[in-house]
Amino acid sequence: MVGEDPVAIVDPGPRIESHISALADAVARASEVVILLTHAHDDHAAAAARLAHRTGGSTLGPGGDHHLGDGQLIRTSGGDLVAVSTPGHARRHFCFHHPDTASIFVGDLILGDGDTTWIGEYRGAVADYLRSLDRLATLAARILHPAHGPPIHDPAPAIARFRAHRLQRVEQVRRAVADGHAGAPAIARHVYGPLPPKIRTMAEAGVDAILDYLSDAE
């Protein structure tokens, strides 16, 4: 949450009634509530409609009631938030820049732990993701707030780490193709090894996205 009145709630999360009640209680004194969505995946956005009903607030962003544009300002009593279009993890994904504190709410563009996030939702996702990381780097934030995991107090190395990991996966897929592996299932087995069914499906989608990226680069 940013500000007190007006207050912005970023990514209210899944539709769990106890969680929604806690959020509604936290902003009960605010006369103006805006619910911002980085993207429409359920673990970020499923609570939005119910929370908006409870608070009388509006929802902005992918999966919300109102369109969100790149560069759009959202007013809060704690300073403006600026919407930054950062597709890749999802076709429509936004970060929210808080210039007053040089911080950015990054959704799933970068996670608080590790060096990767899932990139495989659509054709063009890998190229979009790399461009979004570059754009994030230009904002020169002092702190990143991921939707999953702890805050990141060293943004530049974290952004570089996530970029390097994505490019490493691209190279692994390129080598697998050069070695004669064909099709996303076979390449995913070669690159990742054995995986549970749900994770395997996501890995294959990620490989498909990389194959698309490599075909565009040719």
Image (spheres, rainbow, N blue to C red):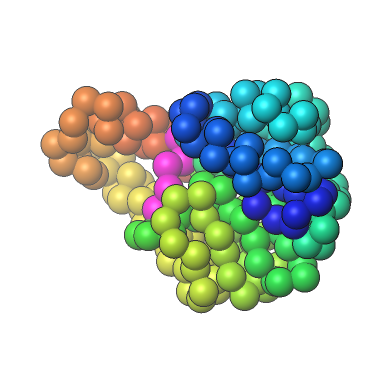
Q: Is residue 152 left or right of residue 134?
A: left
Up-down relation of residue 176 to residue 98 (above or below): above
Q: Residue at x 56, y 48 (%)?
A: 107
Residue 15, position as x, y percentages in the image: 50, 27
Q: Residue at x 42, y 56 (%)?
A: 149
Work out whether residue 80 or residue 87 is closer to the camera in this orientation and state it.
80
Give the residue furthest to the left: 194
Q: Is residue 166 left or right of residue 159?
A: left
Q: Quadrant of residue 38?
A: top right
Q: Which residues are magenta?
A: 116-123
Residue 139 belongs to the span the image colors magenta? no
Work out whether residue 25 or residue 120 is closer to the camera in this orientation and state it.
25
Q: Residue at x 64, y 30 (%)?
A: 51
Residue 161, position as x, y percentages in the image: 43, 66
Q: Quadrant of residue 90?
A: top right
Q: Residue at x 27, y 27 (%)?
A: 198
Up-down relation of residue 138 to residue 191 (above or below): below
Residue 137, position as x, y percentages in the image: 63, 67
Residue 118 belongs to the span the image colors magenta? yes
Callout count: 0
Up-down relation of residue 52 to residue 22 (above or below): above
Q: Is residue 175 left or right of residue 123?
A: left
Residue 177, position as x, y percentages in the image: 30, 40
Work out whether residue 17 or residue 111 is closer to the camera in this orientation and state it.
17
